[in-house]
């Protein structure tokens, strides 16, 4: 699995920089460089094999049902990208170390860069579409985090949000496209998809699949009209711009075009869509770039334009077009990364990126200036540099295009025009920054940057020159295998610098001269642009849309949500009634089933009668809250008795402890409620509520009666039969909780833990007015913790805990279990809180309830995972039957560990909530009420 | 037969004390005397029922049934505390003795 190692190294290695961050500033940089070097070394070790024409595959099933597998492939195309990602990555790491402010800890930054790197490598090495998509979205996420590296600035946050919305949104479209493609082909394996080109192109779903996939590619590669996120992403630190937003991540889109080239290319739709969008983006980006005063803005639009060029070349669908596109991917990455780094150096040394201020830097930093000028010349397409070669191939391809018939001449003309623009903005980058008089109002006096900061730029510029002068000896082999893996054959192409006096050369010449001429007339051009160019921008439209959507959502919420609990409950119950009644009324419904009702016994009748009376009494005294609380606890007690009467001891125990705890919680909450609960409720609302309540109650009774008089096939029989043989316990209720429905329970305790955390967060530092006395104005009693009560409740704690442990241990076979035990233990603790106060208890009980909850959750999850070690499904339980002298025959199921987890979570949750509420009447209120002492 | 007679006797004793306590709670004239009533019900009243229970279950099964002792223990711990807390609350609220108290427990 050496291929997987290439991806895993950076992904796992991302944890390394933060870990070593405390060993000094260079440590994270070294760690990141080490990880990337290892990945690069593995790649280089595999390179000869790929160059010899061998594709390397590896495959491992992940979720076969979904068609998701861990398949990787290292072919020529992937190799080209891997070398770019790791190679430029190393240079960026070196550069970033000097670029970032000395006060910044570098752990997080390098971790994010490595995370991105791993994800990007994953995209290019995936041999499974779904796997590719996972990595695809991961790059969007890491890009989001990197753009917002300085989250304090509004621009950074906005740019990050925009980039995430556009690229991740495109990712969703891509997912849909992949699903369609997978449905057409019958597999998500790339190898299968690539071999099914004809099938895909003739399938009726071809167009939707293509459109969705292109939406993904175009958003990622910043093609018009999705381009605007890229300039807004320039608020990222410059190393990020150099790495993600020019050299690698934005190439993911064109990589996808290349990957699926054999499947989709060559159709008319492909040409018009991909070629059209590419050509327009090429022209548009190049034109806008001329007018950007921000250094990085110019480079960003130039990047958009070059990405358009590559897209256009793929859109042509010709073998030589693909060659030129691939070649330009590499060339652009090399010169644009170095230009971004140079821009970063200038920003770093002058304190600004505004080209109206930075002029004449040649005198201050001649070395940097030389490097930047060479790179900019490569961008413009000056001979002897790498940009010239691929641009020349591009021009040649436009000349040979035959898609538009009589309008064929349009394409080379547009290409030449784009070339003119490119030369103009490159000229601006050179002339405006390094010459053109003296600097104006610079925040800092510039000078050459540290030596090692220039090295990455120098390396990249040297690569520009080398590729530009001796292409055949440098990039030819990699380009050959890359093209081969794309097309299945190596087309005949020449990488010579001089092809004779051909049309493409003429176009290059026109572009160079035209660009110079255009730049010399820049003052007039700027004025015309300001006057005539429409002021709308994609970013503004995006922000406007986001704003409107948010407004719409707010309006909608305001309409539904009037913060009246009464109303919500009315809607909830009303909807339930309608949903439940409709099928009953429409269908053939008989009230009584075939089973005769059991005869009514006296005890049950009494309990039910008291229950009904207590319920009505609660309604009657609802305005007097304390009284209502007392009466409603009678309701709970009667329910408990019902459970006991019908032999459900587990339920009864649970109900009893829940009843107790909720009463205490409500008493605590009652203390903070405003004094007078009298609300004027209209007669109409009264009638509405009464009707709803009556109908709902009657309906429930009818359904219950109908259900209980029928013998419906039930899963209970299964549980009863297999509780002992499968679950190893005789208490079916408990076996269901910890075994049959263990996953449900795990989910439930997770929800409990989340709820506890949320409640603590909501109550955190909450200040509620604490009244100095009761509603009649009488002050609170002085004796807050009566001695007798405190003294008598203390011995109850060990008793309660013993009972809890007992209930917990025996729970698998007799009534009990973790849930009840947790509640019983909580009751014991609550008693101490009530009798002796929060401070007293806290001083003696040094347990973090958060830790209880956390440990409980981990224990339960670990027990579930434990069964995986024995190749059994998640949460399979195992049993042991040791005989312990005093306790008798013990049933040690692994479910017990799970139950202990449940116990801890329940105990911790209850105590967290209670403590949070109890704490409310403590802080800062000392001067307001005698209660403050606690 | 004899066992059943004894059990019935203790049940009746317990029940009558519980009844007397309840009547007292409803009929006695003020808060503090009323506080007196339920204590009869919890001590002698429930005590009688518990004794009956001990005898009945000990006779029915082989060993001596002492679960009831626990119930008694907890009653002895909680009853005085709740009574004391009620009394303290009454004192705090300045409930006067012999004041006119509505005849029924409700309200």
Image (cartoon, coloured by chain):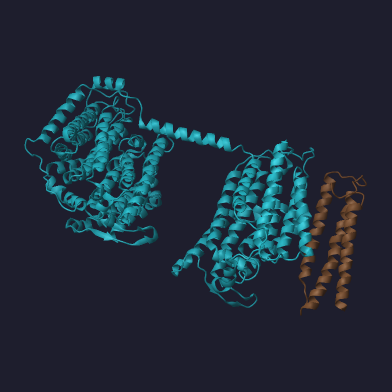
Give the residue displayed 78% in from the left and 40% down from the top. Answer: A779
Q: Which chain is brown?
A: B
| Relative vertical location of residue A11 with respect to residue A509 in this rendering, above or below | below
Tell me if I can see residue A337 in this picture.
no
Q: Position of residue A476 (x, y in %)?
A: 15, 48
Quarter of the figure with residue A170: top left
Q: Position of residue A220 (x, y in %)?
A: 32, 42
Q: Residue furthest left?
A: A500
Give the residue displayed 64% in from the left and 42% down from the top. Answer: A565
In the displayed structure image, the side of residue A440 where residue A151 appears, left or right: right
In the displayed structure image, the side of residue A449 where residue B73 appears, left or right: right
Depth check: give the residue in front, A881 or A676: A676
Q: Position of residue A734 (x, y in %)?
A: 60, 66
In the displayed structure image, the side of residue A474 where residue B1 appears, left or right: right
Q: Position of residue A754 (x, y in %)?
A: 55, 51
In the displayed structure image, the side of residue A855 where residue A807 appears, left or right: right
Depth check: give the residue in front, A18 or A198: A198
Give the residue displayed 30% in from the left and 24% down from the top. Answer: A533
Depth check: give the residue in front, B23 or A922: B23
Q: How many marks?
A: 0
Q: Quadrant of the N terminus of chain A?
A: bottom left
- Specify the colour of chain A: cyan
């Amino acid at each position: 699995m050496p291929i997987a190692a290439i991806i895993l190294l950076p992904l796992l290695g991302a944890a390394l920089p933060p870990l070593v961050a405390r060993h000094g500033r260079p440590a994270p940089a070294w760690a990141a460089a080490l990880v990337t070097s290892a990945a690069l070394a593995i790649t280089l070790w595999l390179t000869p094999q790929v160059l010899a024409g061998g594709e390397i595959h590896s495959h491992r099933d992940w979720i076969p049902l979904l068609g998701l597998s861990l398949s990787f492939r290292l072919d020529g195309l992937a190799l080209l990208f891997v070398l770019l990602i790791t190679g430029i990555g190393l240079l960026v790491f070196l550069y970033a170390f000097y670029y970032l402010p000395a006060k910044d800890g570098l752990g997080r930054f390098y971790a994010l860069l490595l995370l991105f790197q791993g994800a990007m490598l994953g995209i290019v090495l995936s041999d499974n579409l779904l796997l590719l998509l996972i990595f695809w979205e991961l790059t969007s996420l890491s890009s989001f985090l990197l753009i917002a590296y300085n989250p304090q600035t509004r621009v950074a946050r906005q740019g990050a949000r925009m980039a995430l919305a556009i690229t991740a949104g495109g990712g969703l479209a891509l997912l849909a496209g992949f699903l369609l493609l997978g449905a057409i082909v019958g597999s998500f394996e790339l190898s299968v998809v690539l071999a099914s080109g004809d099938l895909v192109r003739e399938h009726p779903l071809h167009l939707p699949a293509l459109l969705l996939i292109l939406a993904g590619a175009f958003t990622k590669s910043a093609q018009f009209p999705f381009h605007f996120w890229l300039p807004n992403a320039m608020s990222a630190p410059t190393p990020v711009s150099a790495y993600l937003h020019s050299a690698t991540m934005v190439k993911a889109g064109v990589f996808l075009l290349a990957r699926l080239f054999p499947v989709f290319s060559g159709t008319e739709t492909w040409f018009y869509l991909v070629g059209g969008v590419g050509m327009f983006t090429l022209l548009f980006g190049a034109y806008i770039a001329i007018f950007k005063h921000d250094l990085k803005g110019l480079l960003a639009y130039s990047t958009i334009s070059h990405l358009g060029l590559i897209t256009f070349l793929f859109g042509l669908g010709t073998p030589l077009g693909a060659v030129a596109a691939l070649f330009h991917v590499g060339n652009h990455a090399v010169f644009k990364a170095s230009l971004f780094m140079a821009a970063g150096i200038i920003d770093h040394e002058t304190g600004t990126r505004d080209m109206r201020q930075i002029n004449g830097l040649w005198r201050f930093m001649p070395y940097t200036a030389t490097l930047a000028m060479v790179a900019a010349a490569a961008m413009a397409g000056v001979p002897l540099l790498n940009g010239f070669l691929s641009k020349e191939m591009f021009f040649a391809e436009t000349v040979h295009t035959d898609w538009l018939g009589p309008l064929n001449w349009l394409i080379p003309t547009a290409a030449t025009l784009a070339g003119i623009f490119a030369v103009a903005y490159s000229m601006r980058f050179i002339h405006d920054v390094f010459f053109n008089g003296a600097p104006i109002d610079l925040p800092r006096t510039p000078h050459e940057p540290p030596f090692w900061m220039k090295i990455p730029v120098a390396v990249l510029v040297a690569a520009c020159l080398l590729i530009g002068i001796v292409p055949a000896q440098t990039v030819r082999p990699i380009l050959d295998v890359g093209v081969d893996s794309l097309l299945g054959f190596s087309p005949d192409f020449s990488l010579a610098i001089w092809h004779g006096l051909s049309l493409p050369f003429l176009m290059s010449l026109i572009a160079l001269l035209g660009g110079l001429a255009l730049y010399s007339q820049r003052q007039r051009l700027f004025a015309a642009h300001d006057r005539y160019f429409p002021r709308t921008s994609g970013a503004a439209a995006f922000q406007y849309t986001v704003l409107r959507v948010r407004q719409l959502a707010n309006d909608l919420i305001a309409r539904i949500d009037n913060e009246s609990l009464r109303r919500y409950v009315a809607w909830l119950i009303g909807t339930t009634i309608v949903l439940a009644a409709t099928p009953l009324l429409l269908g053939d419904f008989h009230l009584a089933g075939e089973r005769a009702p059991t005869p009514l016994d006296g005890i049950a009748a009494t309990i039910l009668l008291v229950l009904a009376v207590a319920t009505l009494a609660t309604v009657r005294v609802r305005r007097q809250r304390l009284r209502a609380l007392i009466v409603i606890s009678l309701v709970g007690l009667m329910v408990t008795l019902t459970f006991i009467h019908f032999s459900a001891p587990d339920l009864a125990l649970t109900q009893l402890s829940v009843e107790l705890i909720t009463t205490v919680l409500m008493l605590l909450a009652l203390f903070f409620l405003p004094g007078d609960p009298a609300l004027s409720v209209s007669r109409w609302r009264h009638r509405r509520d009464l009707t709803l309540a009556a109908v709902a109650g009657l309906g429930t009774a009818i359904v219950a009666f109908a259900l209980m008089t029928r013998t419906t096939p039930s899963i209970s029989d299964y549980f009863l039969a297999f509780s002992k043989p499968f679950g190893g316990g005789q208490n079916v209720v408990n076996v269901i909780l910890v075994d049959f429905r263990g996953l449900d329970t795990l989910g439930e305790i997770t929800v409990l833990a989340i709820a506890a955390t949320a409640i603590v967060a909501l109550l955190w530092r909450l200040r509620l007015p604490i009244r100095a006395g009761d509603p009649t104005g009488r002050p609170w009693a002085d004796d807050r913790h009566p001695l007798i009560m405190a003294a008598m409740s203390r011995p109850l704690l060990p008793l309660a805990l013993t009972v809890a442990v007992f209930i917990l241990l025996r729970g698998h076979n007799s009534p009990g279990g973790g849930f009840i035990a947790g509640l019983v233990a909580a009751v014991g603790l609550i008693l101490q809180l009530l009798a002796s106060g929060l401070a007293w208890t806290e001083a003696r009980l040094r347990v973090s309830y958060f830790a209880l909850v956390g440990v409980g959750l981990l224990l339960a999850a670990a027990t579930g995972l434990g069964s995986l070690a024995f190749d059994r499904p998640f949460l399979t339980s195992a049993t042991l039957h040791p005989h312990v002298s005093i306790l008798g025959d013990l049933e040690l199921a692994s479910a017990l560990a799970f139950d202990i987890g449940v116990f801890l979570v329940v105990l911790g949750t209850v105590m967290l909530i209670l403590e949070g509420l109890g704490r409310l009447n403590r802080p800062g209120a000392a001067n307001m009420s005698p209660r403050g002492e606690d | 037969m004899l066992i059943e007679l004894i059990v019935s006797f203790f049940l009746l004793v317990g029940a009558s004390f519980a009844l007397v306590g309840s009547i007292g709670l409803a009929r006695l004239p003020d808060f503090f005397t009323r506080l007196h009533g339920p204590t009869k019900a919890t001590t002698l009243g429930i005590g009688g029922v518990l004794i009956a229970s001990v005898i009945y279950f000990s006779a029915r099964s082989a060993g001596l049934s002492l679960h009831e002792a626990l119930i008694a223990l907890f009653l002895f711990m909680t009853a005085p505390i709740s009574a004391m807390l009620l009394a303290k609350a009454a004192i705090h609220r300045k409930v006067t003795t012999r004041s006119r108290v509505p005849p029924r427990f409700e309200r």
